Amino acid sequence: MRKETFVRRLLRDKASPLLGVLIVLTIITMILSSGILHGEQISALFTKGFMSSGNLLSVFYNLVIQCLMLCGISMILIGGNIDLSVAGQAALSTMVFGWFCKNTSMAWPLALVITLAMAVCFGLINTFLVNKLKFPPFIATIGMASVYRGLCNVITTGNNIQISRATFITIGNTSIAGILPATFVFALLLIIIYQFVLSKTTFGRTIYMAGGNPNAARLSGIKLNKVRLILFINNSILAAIGGLLWSAQIKMASPTAIISAAPDMRVISAAILGGVSFIGGSGNIVGAFIALLLLNVFDNMLKVLNVQSYWNVFATGFLLAVALIIDYINVERRRKSLLLNR
Amino acid sequence: MKKDSFYIKHIRPLIKHKVFTLILLFIAMVIMFTLWSAIQGGRFFKISTFKNILNSLVISAFLTIGAGCLLISGNIDLAQSAIGAFGGMVLATAVKSWGLPWYLGIVIGLVLCAAFGSLNALLVTKFRFPAFIGTLAMASMARGLMYLFSSIGNKGLAANIAFNNAPLSFIGAGSIGPIPLGIIIMLVFFIIYGIIISKSRFGLKVTLIGGNPVAASLAGINSTAITYILFINSAVLGGIAGVFNTARLGQGALLALQTNQFTGITAAILGGISFGGGAGGMGGAFIGLLILNTFQIGMGVVGVNPFWVNVFSGVLLLVALAFDFIAQRRSRSVLKAY
């Protein structure tokens, strides 16, 4: 009985059509990229093209920073706020870390602690602007994003910093069986933990309430400012860790790499695609994660199929629009069936 | 007594007005840069500087007008700069690869931009996308199509398209008398849109939709039609910005307007258009834009490291918001006193 309701709930979940699309897309990519249509063995399905270990590794490496940001951003969006400065924060964090590693002889964990402390400050600044000065989060964080990005360039006049701490680099480049990076496993763990916090703890439900109906939340004794403080600081720390893991992977602190990859926009798109409401109050991290996988698999599909890069840009937007239309049709159908039942 | 009433009637609303604080900020900024450059032995306060400033804001002005109107109605368009870049590229392709006259190129470009705008509106009104994410998707599609257009005359490879066209370079860099053509067109647009938004029935409807959508629909306002008009308007104005960009550079550039995704929105909000919709006007948006650009050019004149300029413009945005906040709190405390 219990199992049946679980299955039914799964089918009704907003993310399940996305999961279906993801699976279909992955299979199509596997078939097209492995070349079995051109006379390769069936076994090539799992060894060549998309499923080749090199390609999977690169997909997972790209996902790490996005997953970390996803946890932070989803929580913030559900709580009814937004932070557009995550990429800037991640970039500045890696720059500070790189600067300490290069110009001082301190152990890298110490530099890590300093960087994280600074990330907490970023969160505090953002919260201060929104809580105390009542700026709209959207515009306050755009302003701060410009500050963070500018500071990155001020530190090194626009150059990258090589990082040569052996242990740190090893952490970024260890992988299980040559396919699954340790950092990605860490990111997956975080997603599970954050999903648990969000759906099973009192604080998690508080976030939903703060985002869904701020007035009711305030009247029932929830301290909105405190919730926002925790969410912003949490987000900043996750962004900083994400940036550091990225720099461990590429062995240097490179703000331009992070900013031009625009992980923040992709993460926000994924969150909303995955059912997180843009104005707060609904959604979950697992759904957002599935959408994130979908966007990345799609991106990678175009890459392994050697599609011209401009089609890539076009198709990403197109996919997003199609997914949203599917979501709309679903919602409409459900609403109609509700009306009929009445 | 008479003097008092004149003060209450005319002067006080002026001082209380949001735009007034912004003008003060602008004046303070000009004074600061004048003194700063004087210390360094240079001169900030001269006509050519202000001409530079106005010239630099032509392209972002069109973005600001479009974004501002949409923001007042409670919507947002993140695709505007991408659509504009697309329109500019269509113009370059039409002139270079298809050999069409310049005016036809502009018309085709703007019509395609309008098509993008109506698609935006369709997604937001019919399919009820959140505007933020729907237009983000459209932005990516517009950029992709821009690459496609640029590859037409280039053997399938996306690249900048340079062209030689006298009327277009006149649009980009020519001037009527001492005043550059771009500045004149921009000011005319600001005035027309300012009148439409603050004086016409249509502008009133736009503001009402942004301020209270439910009340607007109960009052019989067709918000779908207005949303369509505003999205198309925003896209076409983006297209005009793209046309100016192409005309100035003499080429359809792949990176055109890349850094301008938030310029229009930022300037509009800085100029007192509220983010949730329902308040603000074009005068404020113009001053907001003026402040942003004066700051950047002023920083260049006094010779600040360009890396710091980026940091400072973020701080400037926050300072301007703080001004707004203080003004609001003052008016709230006045209300409480009553």
Image (cartoon, grey):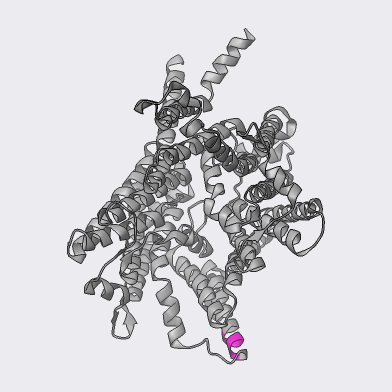
**Residue B235 coordinates in the image, percent (x, y):** 35, 54
The answer to whether A256 is drawn above or below residue B57 in the figure is: above
Name the outermost residue toward the left: B100
Quarter-wise, where is residue A182 in the image?
A: top right
Q: Nearer the viewer, residue A120 or B28?
A: A120
| Magenta-span inclusion, residue A123 | no
The answer to whether B43 is drawn above or below residue A70 in the figure is: below
Number of numbered markers: 0
Give the main secondary structure, helix, strand or loop, of the magenta stretch. Answer: helix
Rendered residue at 61%/65% (across/down) = A153
**Residue A245 coordinates in the image, percent (x, y):** 67, 46
Describe residue A297's horizontal placement relative to residue B302 as left or right.
Answer: left
Q: Which residues are magenta?
A: B34-38
The answer to whether residue A14 is visible is no
The answer to whether B40 is drawn above or below residue B256 in the figure is: below
**Residue A91 coordinates in the image, percent (x, y):** 63, 55
